[in-house]
Amino acid sequence: MPVCSLPKADPRVKTLDEIFDDANGDLAVGDLENAAQKYRRTVDLDPEFFDGWHALGMALMKVGRFPEAIEAGKKAVELRPNDQIGWTSLSLFYNRNGNIKEAEAAGAKAKVLSWGGKIAKEDRS
């Protein structure tokens, strides 16, 4: 009886976690554009990857691409509406872009979460 073997993984193809770790390394050494590109790859691979969206927003903000940072931040809080750091970061992105009203609204949501409140009802299924 023949033995079935699985194909070997291509060592040139990186996993989402490896790409994310590489991006964090780029960020640590100040290579912000490469970090942003790699964070973008992580969310392209997994659009539900909160950490990727959050990190992408932070990297984009650091290079002055505020509208893109806002979009990434909005996606992050859409994925985790009760994440205080997500709302705090989104507030910062809005602030840097000069959107003070939106920054204050996002900051208020972060404050509610810091008090133990919730922005969205959590699904307990």
Image: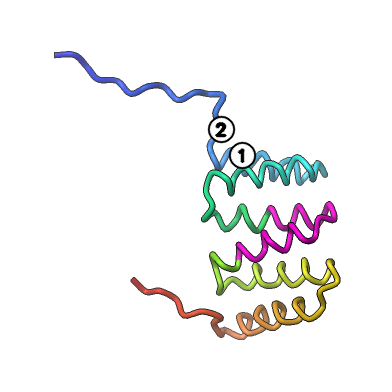
Query: Where does the C terminus fall, quadrant-wise?
Result: bottom left
- Provide the secondary structure element on which disc 1 rests: helix
Name which residue type carries label 1.
Ile
Residue at 56% in and 42% down: 17
Looking at the rendered structure, which numbered label has been put on residue 122?
none
Residue 68 drawn in magenta: yes
Q: Residue furthest top?
A: 2
**Percent x, y of residue 5:** 29, 20
75 vs 114, nearest the viewer: 75
Q: Closer to the N terminus: mark 2 or mark 1?
A: 2
- Provide the secondary structure element on which disc 2 rests: loop
**Percent x, y of residue 18:** 58, 38
Determine whether label 2 and label 1 are within 8 Å by CB: yes
Give above or below for 30 relative to 88. Answer: above
25 vs 32, nearest the viewer: 32
- According to the picture, the residue beneath numbered tag 1 turns out to be 19
Q: Which residues are magenta?
A: 56-76
Give above or below for 34 relative to 105. Answer: above
Residue 52 drawn in magenta: no
- According to the picture, the residue beneath numbered tag 2 turns out to be 14
Query: Where does the N terminus fall, quadrant-wise?
Result: top left
Residue at 70% in and 77% down: 106
Name which residue type carries label 2.
Lys
Q: Is 48 placed left or right of 63 in the picture?
A: left
Q: Is 124 placed left or right of 19 in the picture?
A: left
40 vs 88, nearest the viewer: 40
**Percent x, y of residue 69:** 74, 59
Residue at 82% in and 78% down: 100
Residue 34 occupies quadrant: top right
Q: Is 64 placed left or right of 40 in the picture?
A: right
